[in-house]
Structure formats: C-alpha cells, structure tokens
Amino acid sequence: MLIKDAGGEFALIERLREIVPSRHPEVLVGIGDDAAVIRINEGQNPFMLVTTDTLVADDHFNTRWAKPEQIGIKTVECNVSDIAAMGGVPTFMFVSLVLTPETTLEWTEGLYRGMADSCGRHGVITAGGDTTHGKVETISITLLGRVSPENLCLRSHAMPGDCIAVTGRLGASTAALNLLRKNLPVTSYLLEKHLTPRCRLDASQLLAPIVHAMIDISDGLASEVNHVCRQSGVGAEVFAKDIPLHPDVIDAGRTLGIPPADFALNGGEDFELLFTISPENLYKLKQTGLSYYQVGRITDRGEAAFLVTESGDKIPLKGGYNHFR
C-alpha cells in the first residue's frame, strides 16, 4: 500500500508511533505537536524543546529561483517557528546535509551564510551535525529550545468558546510558488514571503502567557485548525470573510484562476502563528500591541471543524498541504 493510499503523512505518523517506543516519564510531550517537551531538571526552566525538520531540493526549495543564502534562512526560520509555537526560545542547532556530487563549495558556503544570518537573529548556536552524499540535496535540522512551564503552549489546550486568531496575513508563500512555477511575474512582497520568510518568535513570547493552544502555520490554515481540534477534542468554525489576505495574494489568485483563500487554507510555509484565546483574555492581547486577525472560534467538544462561507454556508474544513498526495 502506498503512503498516500493509507491516509498521507499524518496517518503514517500515527501508525509509526505505535511501533517505536516513545513513552517515558521525562517525555512530557512526544510525537504529535510542533516540538517534543522533555523534562531535564527541576529548576527555573525545567523543560527542553526538541524539533526536527527536513528540506529536500525541488520539493521544499528550488535552486532555479532561490539563492543558497535564502535557502539557509528559510531552513532555520521554519525550525525556529516550531519552537515559537510551543512558547519557547531556541538554543542549539544541529545540521545534517546530503550533498550531490555536483554541489559546489560556493553553494554550500552560501547556504551556511544564510543559516548564520537567521541564527544570529534568534540567538541560536550551531553545535554540530553530519554531512554525506546522495542524489538530492537535503537539509535536516534538529533544533533545541527551552520553555518555562507557564509559557508552554500545546495544540491540545484549546477550549470551547475560544477565539481563533493568527498573527499575520496568509497565503503569500504559496501564491509566489504558483506564480514562479508558471514563470509569471511575482511581486517583491510575495517573493520575500516565499524565499526569506520570518517566523514569529517575537509574537510567541507575548502570546504564550495568555493563550490556550498555539501552532505554527506551515501546512496551511485548514490543516493547522484541524490539528488543534483533533488534539483538543473540539470543533471549530473558520469564517472565510475573515481570512487575512494581502492584495498581492488576491491579485495572484485572479492571475492564476485560483480562489485566493485557497492559498491560505491549503498552502503553507507562512510561518505565522495560529492561537486560541479566551474572550476574557482578548483585552490582555490588545494590551501587548501585537497585530492579529481573528478568523474563527472553537466550538464544543466532539464537534467537527467547518469553514463558514461568505454566504453563511458551513462546509467541512478540509485541505492543507499533504507531503504524500
């Protein structure tokens, strides 16, 4: 059976977690969130965060339009985004590379310059890694972080009645990718969002003490809302009219003949944060001065996730990026 026929990436993860040992008294959160949470001591910051991500050439990055420095930036930002989604701060990074016989020294050094730029922005130290050869350039990052118990945010903490909000406009990275693949003009805004994204570690530190659940938007709004609902055992309503889209994303949709909201719902690599927060805590959120967009609400336990169209129809909220479609 092919993985896509078995339900795709997340069905695969659920099957594999039944095979490997993953339960341990010090593993507080294992497979199924943005990062693992491991108890390492009883001090002020007793929890270590561990996340890993792999980027493959011609799938997660394309050397036809991405410079090595840009690829390096994106590689680090997508990992720091996972730490941010847990309410944590990144610390140490380990880099494993698969390089082809045609990979040049100049390309590899450019990649590391980009990673160093992003690491410097977030206070990350590169502490080791591995290098080998293969048929496709592949970059795998393992990133460690730390988080205090009061700041720890999980996908499983959403509560009925919570507001669902995001930290920024969505869909730009996927809109850019679709235009690039068709050799169509791409605005500087879209290009920047796709080639050199910036994760929201800044927002995370303001949100963590006052929100319930949090997740980064790497696989599309629809996918992330469903992850939160599944882990929390709740339902959701996302209002199509409230999905924040930049004018360039709307124009890209017109050019490509694709509903612009589809870029936000089913694309990914926005690396904004999606969070749920009680209505009572909205005043605290406003006091932070953080810009955000309210896109929906969490409904009762056991309910499903729906997209509410502009005409008021409720349709199942499906979609999101699938690595094995």
Image (cartoon, rainbow, N blue to C red):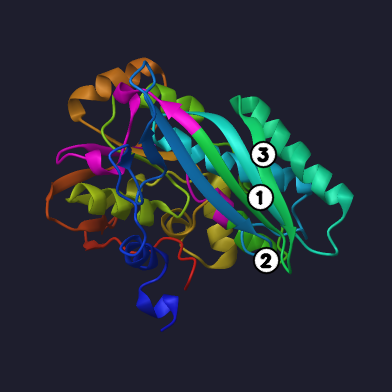
Which callout, 3 or 1, points at the residue further toward the start of the chain?
Answer: 1
Instruction: Identify the mark at residue 96; answer none if there is no mark.
Output: 1
Question: For the residue marked with disc 1, what is the amino acid?
Answer: Ser
Magenta stretch: give its range.
Answer: 145-174
**Residue 152 magenta-drawn?**
yes
Look at the picture and state if 150 lies above or below 319. Answer: above
Left or right: residue 299 compared with residue 83? left
- Contact between marks 3 and 1 (CB within 8 A): the answer is no
Q: Is residue 323 visible?
A: yes
Measure how far apart labels 3 and 1 are at the Cα level.
8 Å
Measure how far apart labels 2 and 3 are at the Cα level.
35 Å
Helix, strand or loop under label 2: helix
Left or right: residue 164 compared with residue 49? left
Q: Residues within 10 Å of mark 2 (few under 14, many from 20)?
A: few
Query: Circle 3 is placed at which residue position?
Result: 128
Foreground: disc 2 or disc 1: 1
Q: Residues within 10 Å of mark 1 (few under 14, many from 20)?
A: some
Helix, strand or loop under label 3: strand
Query: Circle 2 is placed at which residue position?
Result: 181
**Image spot of residue 168 (x, y percent):** 46, 37
